[in-house]
Amino acid sequence: MPNPLIEGVKVKPLKPIADERGHLMELVRRDDSMFLKFGQVYMTTAYPGVVKGWHYHKIQVDNFSCVRGQIKLALYDEREQSSTRGTVNEFFLGIRSPILVQVPALVWHGFKCVSQEEAIIINVATEPYRHDGPPDEYRRPWNDPAMPYDWERKNG
C-alpha cells in the first residue's frame, strides 16, 4: 500500500492542450484553489542521473512541474507536529506525467532526473529568493543516511 500523502502536499493534474502548432499547459493560476501567493518563478535543470536535494524552506512553499524530461521528486515529512511525520512521498513529474506538486514549508524535498535527456523544472515559489541575506533554504547531502529514501532506480 502506498504511503499517505504528506500533510499539506497537493497534487494537480495538468492538461496539455495541443493543436497543429504545438501545445500549451497552464501550471498555476491565481484563481486556482492551490494558489497561495506569488514570490517568483524560476527554472532549474538536472542532467540525467543527477540528484538535487535534500533541502527545505521555513517559509516558502514550492509548486514544482517538470516541462522537459522526467524527474523523480521525493518528499520527507520530519515536522514534529505533523500527522504524517515520518512519511515519504515519491512523484514522477514530466512530459509523460504532467502534474504540479505543491510542497509545503518544512518538508524535505529533492529530485533526480530519471530521463535520458536533461530535465527542465519550473517552480512557482511563494517567496522571492533573498539575495541580500541568508536564503530560506536548509540543506542535507543528497545521500545523507539519516534520510529514509534511496535514490537508486527500483527495477521490478
Image (cartoon, rainbow, N blue to C red):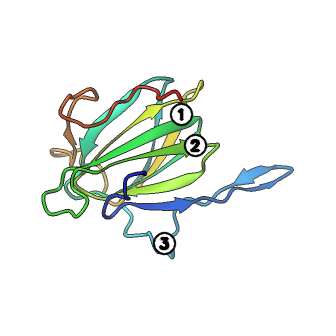
Please give left or right for residue 51 compared with residue 96 in the image. Answer: left
Q: Which mark is residue 30?
A: 3
Q: Position of residue 46 (x, y in %)?
A: 46, 30
Q: Residue at x 41, y 25 (%)?
A: 152
Residue contact at pointers 1 and 2, CB within 8 angstroms: yes
Check disc 3: other Cα within 10 Å, few if <14, some if 14-19, many if 20+: few
Compared with 49, 43 (above or below) is below
Q: Earlier in the sequence, mark 3 or mark 1?
A: 3
Residue that badge 1 annotates = 119
Which amino acid is tagged 2? Answer: Gly
Badge 1: few (under 14), some or many (20 or more) residues near its Cα, within 10 Å?
A: many
Of label 1 and label 2, which has the lower sequence position? 2
Residues 18 and 98: in front is 98
Three-letter amino acid code of the residue under disc 1: Ala
Say if 42 sits above or below 140 in the image.
Answer: below
Question: Closer to the camera: disc 3 or disc 1?
Answer: 1
- Per the model, the C-alpha gap separating discs 3 and 1 is 26 Å
Residue 127 horizontal side relative to residue 146, left or right: right
Q: Nearer the viewer, residue 4 or 114?
A: 4
Q: Are marks 3 and 1 in contact (CB under 8 Å)?
A: no
Q: Nearer the viewer, mark 2 or mark 3?
A: 2
Q: x%, y% of residue 134?
A: 15, 44
Q: Nearer the viewer, residue 1 or 55?
A: 1
Residue at 22% x, 44% y: name it.
Answer: 137
Q: Which residue is mark 2?
A: 94
Q: What kind of element bears circle 3?
A: loop
Asked if the residue under mark 3 is in contact with the one under mark 2, i.e. CB atoms within 8 Å, the reply is: no
Picture layout, residue 10 above or below residue 86: below
| Mark 2, secondary structure of its residue | strand
User: Residue at the left extreme?
Assistant: 80
Q: Disc 2 or 3, which lies upstream in sequence?
A: 3
The image position of residue 109, as x and y in percent, is: 32, 44
